[in-house]
């Protein structure tokens, strides 16, 4: 399982799909990320070549299986970091979510597994979202 490199534009583009089910128009992504349309377009083309998404020009961008898997993996990290932050620092669930968006890609799968075990493999995050237990991240036995 190779996660996109955190901090890259491609990574930020993928993260936009966390907030929106289904397709997104490149123009919307450009707006949300405050980037030039042409910059976004070329990143999207690169991601298309990697098999992460599909973009038929003038249409919405859709994630392909590979992209959806990467996103699910990010979500696994995201939610388990929320669990950890809320418990250890007693911060609000809203704040924990915001911080976890930043931290998610920087935590190793090994650390995420430790958090998961520490909290008895939680099913939902503090914001009541289902935690996808992505098999490529770590396994439960
Ligand atoms: Zn787990
Ligand atoms: Zn992982």
Image: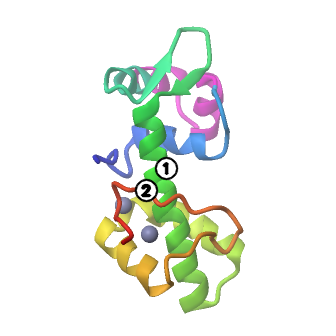
Q: Secondary structure at mark 1?
A: helix
From the viewer's side, name the closer residue of 129 and 42. Answer: 129
Tell which circle, 2 or 1, labels the residue nearer the N-terminal end. Answer: 1
> Which quadrant of the figure has residue 45?
top left
Residue 19: say if magenta. no
* Segment colored magenta: 25-42
Ligand 2 lies under 8 Å from the Cβ of mark 2: yes
Name above or below for residue 136 compared with residue 99.
Answer: above
**Residue that badge 2 annotates:** 134
> Ligand 1 sits in which quadrant?
bottom left
Position of the C terminus, as image quadrant, is bottom left
Asked whether disc 2 touches disc 1, contact meaning CB atoms under 8 Å apart, the reply is yes
Q: Residue at position x 44%, y 32% from top?
A: 65
**Crowd tier of the residue under label 1, counting other residues whose Cα lies within 10 Å: few below 14, some 14–19, many 20 or above:** some
- Give residue 24's position: percent from left, percent from top: 63, 27
Classify residue 83 as left or right of residue 64: right
């Amino acid at each position: 399982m190779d996660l996109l490199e955190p901090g890259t534009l491609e990574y930020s583009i993928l993260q936009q799909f966390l907030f929106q089910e289904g397709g997104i128009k490149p123009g919307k992504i450009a707006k949300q990320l405050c980037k030039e349309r042409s910059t976004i377009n070329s990143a999207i083309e690169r991601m298309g070549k990697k098999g992460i998404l599909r973009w038929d020009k003038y249409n919405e961008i859709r994630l392909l299986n590979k992209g959806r898997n990467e996103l699910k993996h990010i979500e696994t990290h995201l939610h388990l970091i929320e669990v950890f932050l809320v418990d250890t620092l007693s911060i609000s669930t809203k704040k924990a979510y915001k911080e976890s968006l930043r931290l998610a890609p920087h935590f190793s799968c090994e650390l995420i597994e430790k958090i998961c075990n520490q909290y008895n493999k939680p099913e939902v995050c503090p914001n009541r979202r289902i935690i996808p237990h992505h098999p490529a991240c770590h396994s439960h036995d």
